[in-house]
Image (cartoon, rainbow, N blue to C red):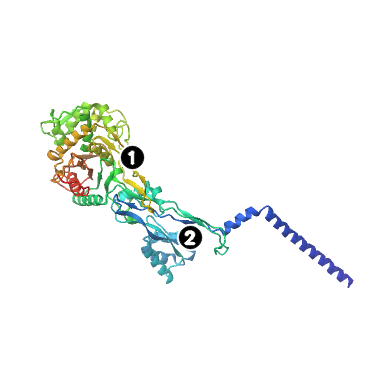
Amino acid sequence: MQHSEKKNKVRSVMIGFTLMVLLSCVLIRLLWIQTFDSKELLAMAEKRWENSNSILHAKRGSIYDRTKQEAYTWEVPGYYFVADPSQIKDVSQTAKILSPLLEIPVGVLEEKLSLKKKAVEIKYEGKGKYSPSIYSKIFALKKKGKVAGIYGYPTHMREYNSSELAHVLGFLNSNGDAVGGVEQVYDKWLRGVDGTIKYHKAKNGMRISDGPETFKPPVNGKDLILSIDAKIQHETEDAINEAMKKYQAKGATAIVADPKTGEILSMVSRPTFDPQNIAKTFDPAKNGHNIAVESQYEPGSTFKIVTLAASINEKLFKPNATFASGSIKVGDRTFHDSNRSGWGTITYQRAVELSSNVGFIHLGQQLGAEKLSDYIRRFGFGSITEKFGKRTGIDLPAEGKGYYYNRALYPVELAASSFGQGISVTPIQQIAAISAIANNGYWVKPHVLKEVVDPRTKKEVYQYPITKHQIIEPQTATKVRQILRGVVLNGTAKAANSPDFEVAGKTGTAQIPDPKGGYIPNEYIVSFIGFAPSSHPDVVIYVAFDRPTMNFSSMSGGAIAAPVAREILEKILPIRQVTSK
């Protein structure tokens, strides 16, 4: 009995000792946490309690035409969808149901819905955001048990009013990234600044009402006011669309600009796409290039305006002096006029009207390589003795530079350059050059942005500056305008003549270089460049068609591009409140 009591007493002491040791460990650990690890553990706890930053997306700015009455693109409510593949029992069936609604191929959806992830955002190429009606249809399918594991979340999506101005506007891809046009160039203005909200939550996800909270509201993007006039753009698009059908051209471009400010009033590039339906209509290789800004090709006779202006500015042009037309030999090469037998002995005034290559070769030779190169540079094309030309600096992406000789000009190259052969330039470079003739000798930087406006206050926060400098004498520009009016009245551009307005300009019919050498037979880029009214120009215009294929009596700029330019001018000048003559 005594032995048993002694044994129990020893056991009690051992248990008591063990409990004291354990209690001591707990107390020591608590002391350590409160004194040494408190900050680190508090941060870990808050990180666990605190919800990951909820991003409050800023509303992207809208884009308007110059009148602020026509909206080209704006934000509307939308949804994006996220799938939880672990909840999807029949991937194939779910993909087949969702494919027509989301406009994503079944195979692509099957691949996404089979991923071993907790959350997969459903997007593909141009599709990533959807209208409330699509959300409602998918929600109804979920209620009926036909689909599972698909969740929709509210967002904003871009809305475009039409496919007009597609290349100037650009678009947003499925990731919300700006691609091309002013969407890309002015993305920082448009996108604004996203906000955030942080709050504390319990382990079960319930918000703790008295926990610390931070809130940073989003700053919505600014609105862009373009220099584009919606009415002028519409008339230009209509004219080019009709001409594309009529002449079956591979491509086309048209630009209308204000020569005094450099503002682009309309810009068209064909083939085109629909920014509202990128997934089905956009192909970077086929219609992703803005021809007006990016394409580089031989200008042909429209480039003769530079040689003419240089000759007049240097006091070398003698309108009544004569020469023998038809052909001329320079070095080992013989150059011909479009009329290979020529028009006999003609004046230099008549040479401009008839677009005589021989006449302009003579003018180029009188100027010399150094002078001609200097004027090509003055007119904004860059140095012809370098490999590449110079961009105008227009506020659109991927602008071309032009291709040149990358050396001092040989006599044959001087001759070819005098009438626009052997070099490549862009349409926008030519618009800037003709603007200098229309604007009394001042070269003006072209641009498509007019101003930036705060959508809340409607106040202007930025105005695009006019950048210009004088390149020729005002009297030179006046003389060139008069001569170019003669080209429309008496020369190759007669089809540009209007009974209502005095049009001046120059046609171009440029051969297309063959990569193997020489030029491709019977393939041309035909163009017209000019302005109206001729004595006090209000607008400048450039129209070009790439390889028209219909068998008309003449595949020339005068027969194809000039009448389209006249049609556009007759419709847009009244919009500009220019009265008829």
- Tag on residue 90? none
What type is the residue that disc 2 sits on? Answer: Ala
Out of 385 and 74, give the one closest to the viewer. Answer: 74
Out of 174 and 168, give the one closest to the viewer. Answer: 168
Query: Which residue in the rendered view is the most extreme toward the left?
Result: 344
Q: Secondary structure at mark 2?
A: loop
Residue 333 appears in the picture as rendered = no
Residue 189 image offset from top left, x and y in percent: 39, 48
Tell me if 329 is positioned left or right of 69 in this view.
Answer: left
Q: At 12% from the left edge and 29% from the top edge, which residue is drawn?
A: 320
Residue 245 image offset from top left, x and y in percent: 20, 52
Residue 488 appears in the picture as rendered = yes
Residue 79 image offset from top left, x and y in percent: 41, 61
Mark 2: few, some, or many residues within 10 Å (few <14, many ≥20)?
A: some
Check the picture and name the quadrant holding the N terminus: bottom right
Instruction: Report which residue position mark 1 lands on.
Output: 393
Label 1 vs label 2: CA separation?
A: 44 Å
Q: Say if 471 sits above or below 201 in the image.
A: above
Q: Say if 225 sits above or below 150 in the image.
A: above
Nearer the observer: mark 1 or 2; the answer is 1
Total count of labels: 2
Q: Say if 274 sits above or below 373 in the image.
A: below
Q: Earlier in the sequence, mark 1 or mark 2?
A: 2
Instruction: Report which residue position mark 2 lands on.
Output: 119
What type is the residue that disc 1 sits on? Answer: Gly
Out of 115 and 185, give the one closest to the viewer. Answer: 185
Q: Where, by quadrant of the figure, is residue 344 drawn?
A: top left
Q: Secondary structure at mark 1?
A: loop
Check the picture and name the quadrant holding the C terminus: top left
Q: Say if 6 sits above or below 426 in the image.
A: below
Tell me if 188 is positioned left or right of 270 in this view.
Answer: right
Mark 1: few, some, or many residues within 10 Å (few <14, many ≥20)?
A: some
